Image (cartoon, helix red, strand yellow):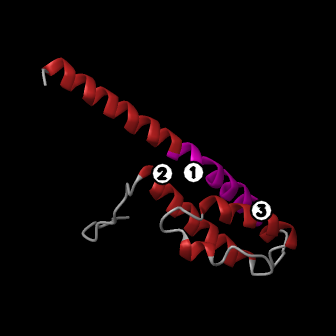
């Protein structure tokens, strides 16, 4: 294969990877926005003194579970996406789900370095 043909193949492969990445990014955008919105609302409820997640969240949580069902590493967080539990417990599950979605969307960009020393 000559250099021009090889370059064309590489360009087509790069374009395909780009299209797949954009499709995956688009697929993850909706659940990330839902999680952000729910976290905001739950914090408001918490500030107002509510202790339990209202039943009105049930349908949105069911929708969210459907959106992330095939996303790797979301299983543990999905188990606690339910109503009639403490607001803090649902928020913890949503933060865990958010982290899994960000890792899926952007890759693991941060790894803790045990050798780091923080000075005041």
For the stretch drawn in magenta, what is the main secondary structure? helix
Out of 72 and 57, give the one closest to the viewer: 72
Out of 19 and 56, give the one closest to the viewer: 19
120 in relation to 53, above or below: above
User: For the residues marked 3 and 1, what is the alpha-carbon distance in whole angstroms?
Assistant: 16 Å
Residue 43 is at least partly visible in this image:
no
- Judged from the image, the secondary structure of the residue bearing numbered disc 1 is helix
Q: Residues within 10 Å of mark 3 (few under 14, many from 20)?
A: some
- Residue 62 at what x, y percent from top left? 74, 66
Q: Along the polypeptide, which appears first: circle 3 or circle 1?
A: 1
Out of 76 and 44, give the one closest to the viewer: 76
**Residue plotted at (34% across, 63% down):** 111
User: For the residues marked 3 and 2, what is the alpha-carbon distance in whole angstroms?
Assistant: 22 Å
Q: Along the polypeptide, which appears first: circle 1 or circle 2?
A: 1
Quadrant of the image occupied by residue 117: bottom left
**Where residue 28 is drawn, which disc sits there?**
1
Quadrant of the image occupied by residue 94: bottom right
- Judged from the image, the secondary structure of the residue bearing numbered disc 3 is helix
- Judged from the image, the secondary structure of the residue bearing numbered disc 2 is helix
Q: Residues within 10 Å of mark 2 (few under 14, many from 20)?
A: some
Query: Mark 3–mark 1 contact, CB under 8 Å?
Result: no
- Residue 39 at what x, y percent from top left? 70, 62
**Residue plotted at (32% across, 34% down):** 13
Q: Is residue 75 left or right of residue 14?
A: right
Kindly identify which residue carries mark 3.
60
Query: Mark 1–mark 2 contact, CB under 8 Å?
Result: yes
Kindly identify which residue carries mark 2.
105
**Residue plotted at (52% across, 41% down):** 23
- Residue 48 at what x, y percent from top left? 85, 69
Q: Which residues are magenta?
A: 24-44
Q: Name, please, the residue furthest toward the front.
A: 1
């Amino acid at each position: 294969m000559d250099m021009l043909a090889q370059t064309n193949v590489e360009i087509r492969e790069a374009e395909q990877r780009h299209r797949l990445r954009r499709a995956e990014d688009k697929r993850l955008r909706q659940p990330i926005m839902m999680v952000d919105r729910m976290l905001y609302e739950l914090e408001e409820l918490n500030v107002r003194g509510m202790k339990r997640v209202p039943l009105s969240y049930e349908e949105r949580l069911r929708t969210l579970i459907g959106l992330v069902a095939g996303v790797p590493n979301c299983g543990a967080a999905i188990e606690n996406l339910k109503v009639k539990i403490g607001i803090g417990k649902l928020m913890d599950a949503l933060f865990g789900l958010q982290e899994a979605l960000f890792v899926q969307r952007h890759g693991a960009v941060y790894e803790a370095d045990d050798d780091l020393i923080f000075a005041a």
